[in-house]
Image (tube, helix red, strand yellow):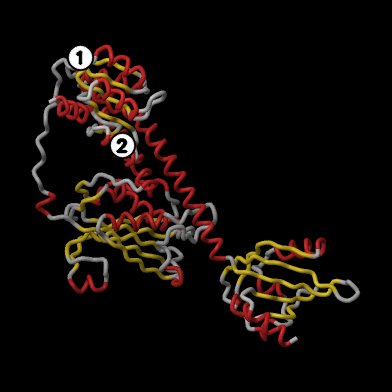
Amino acid sequence: MQEQAALLDIATDAIIVQNLDNDILFWNKSAERLYNWKVEEVLGQKIDNLLFPPNSSSMQTALKHLFEANEWQGELNQITKNNQKLIVESRWTLVRDAENQPNSILIVNTDITEKKKLELQFLRTQRLESLGTLAGGIAHDLNNVLAPILLAVEILRAKLQDERSLKLMSILETNVKRGSDLVKQVLSFARGIEGERTNIQLAHLISEIQKIATETFPKSINIRSNIQTNQLWIVSGDATQLHQIILNLCVNARDAMSDGGTLTISAQNIVLDNNSTILNPEAKVGRYILLTIADTGYGIEPEILDRIFEPFFTTKDIGKGTGLGLSTVLGIIKSHGGFINVSSQVGKGSEFQVYLPAIDITESKKAPENITPMLSGNGELILVVDDEPGICEFVCATLELYNYKVVTASDGIEAIAIYAQQKQDISAVLLDMMMPNMDGITTIRTFKRLNSQIKIIATSGFVGNDKIAELARTGVKTFLAKPYNTEQLLKMLHTLLN
């Protein structure tokens, strides 16, 4: 029996024997390693008290099936001596005595905790890939909706010159551009697309988010800000992504204060010297904006503080968090040349310090570029190809307003037929890349067979990097992303024609 017990101790699986009253009779070395309970601590103890979370019904379910079929196999959620959660693949066998009466239960448990985590990450990765595909389709459709609105605003602005109309046009234009920025934000998350970098005063972003938080967060949360707007340095970055950083950190702070508290957002200029860079390996000597978001919530436990930026790691309940918020924040901060520090005390709250490089004062005080007048045409005929009637109509109206002639087509097949008849008169083609019947790339290649020197501007609400590369291989190098305004359209058309 001792030899057999020694062999069981060599096994990598946890092997346990219990009687019918759930008292532990045997406990091998692997069980000691897995659960951190020594054999002398567990013999005679109730197995359900040691290994199962409170109020768990899984053991009773397993026992019921065991007595019906003499064996049972399945996954169990269990805990160690230190209350660490485990997932085991468990095989139970009902052992009978010489008279064929149930005598004890042999249990063999394999730790599959890491395996389940990897499976979960794989499923989440697949979900993200699906989200990326879905985001691309949504981006195209939304930008197609926004494009005619933006063009319509500029047509109406040229016709309606009274103060109230101009004010309404300005509000409408701002909101259309904001909608386009939100689409870019979804794409930057789902597909890692880089946004446009501009000079940004963080105080304006913070002020906007403070307003959103005040209107939407529970009234039990007091929101404060401490910013010196006129003295704060400028950063170079993507406004939508920086907006996302601040908003994500504020939302996390809100979730940490379910019983109320204080959320403080502050920003200040700071210069890091050599000593500071020693303390922060990712830092470089120079000028930074220090953005601090602090809460008085329940804090972060020390043992998980180092893991909070891991993708898919979350302490929130199932269905309430993806574990992607802080990993996205970290990615954006690093892409802007910055870094982040976190400090937290359980029961007192957390503080996130975001360091973003400030740009040179001289760089931020460049003279404004001269506003170029709208570039009118000279009666050239432009073929506009788009399956969205609203876009065709407003592009046509815009171009005619600036002395172009326009002919339209709703898909590639119709466009080819029109071009074949009027190719001597058509000066350029404005072509949507995503259309039914014949897509943009196929249409371009057919155009090239009719006229290798044809001038084409490709447009789309969303085109991935692979399509851009394929577009370049066709020889078309002019691409206009939707929604575009009148100035962008006229400038690109003028450059192409001249």
Residue type, numbered disc 2: Glu
Between 381 and 401, the one nearer to me in the picture: 381
User: How many discs appear?
Assistant: 2
Between 242 and 425, the one nearer to me in the picture: 425
Element on which disc 1 rests: loop
Q: Is residue 61 left or right of residue 376?
A: right
Q: Position of residue 338 (x, y in %)?
A: 26, 60
Q: Is residue 70 left or right of residue 84?
A: right
Q: Position of residue 36 (x, y in %)?
A: 59, 79
Q: Is residue 324 left or right of residue 114?
A: left
Q: On the image, numbered disc 1 is attached to which residue?
A: 424
Between 3 and 46, the one nearer to me in the picture: 3
| 390 is higher (above) or lower (below) than 370 | above
Element on which disc 2 rests: helix
Q: Residue furthest right?
A: 99
Mark 1 is surrounded, within 10 Å at the Cα level, by few (under 14), some (14 to 19) or many (20 or more) other residues, namely few
Q: Is residue 164 visible?
A: no
Between 134 and 429, the one nearer to me in the picture: 429
| 10 is higher (above) or lower (below) than 346 | below
Q: CA distance from mark 2 to mark 1?
A: 27 Å
Residue type, numbered disc 1: Gln
Q: Position of residue 468 (x, y in %)?
A: 30, 38
Quarter residue 17 falls in: bottom right
Q: Residue at x 28, y 55 (%)?
A: 335
Q: Residue at x 18, y 19 (%)?
A: 402
Instruction: State which tag comes first along the sequence, 2 or 1.
Output: 1
Q: Is residue 169 left or right of residue 74?
A: left
Q: Residue at x 11, y 31 (%)?
A: 372
Q: Looking at the figure, which quarter contains the N terminus?
A: bottom right
Q: Is residue 402 visible?
A: yes
Q: Residue furthest top?
A: 421
Q: On the image, numbered disc 2 is attached to which residue?
A: 470
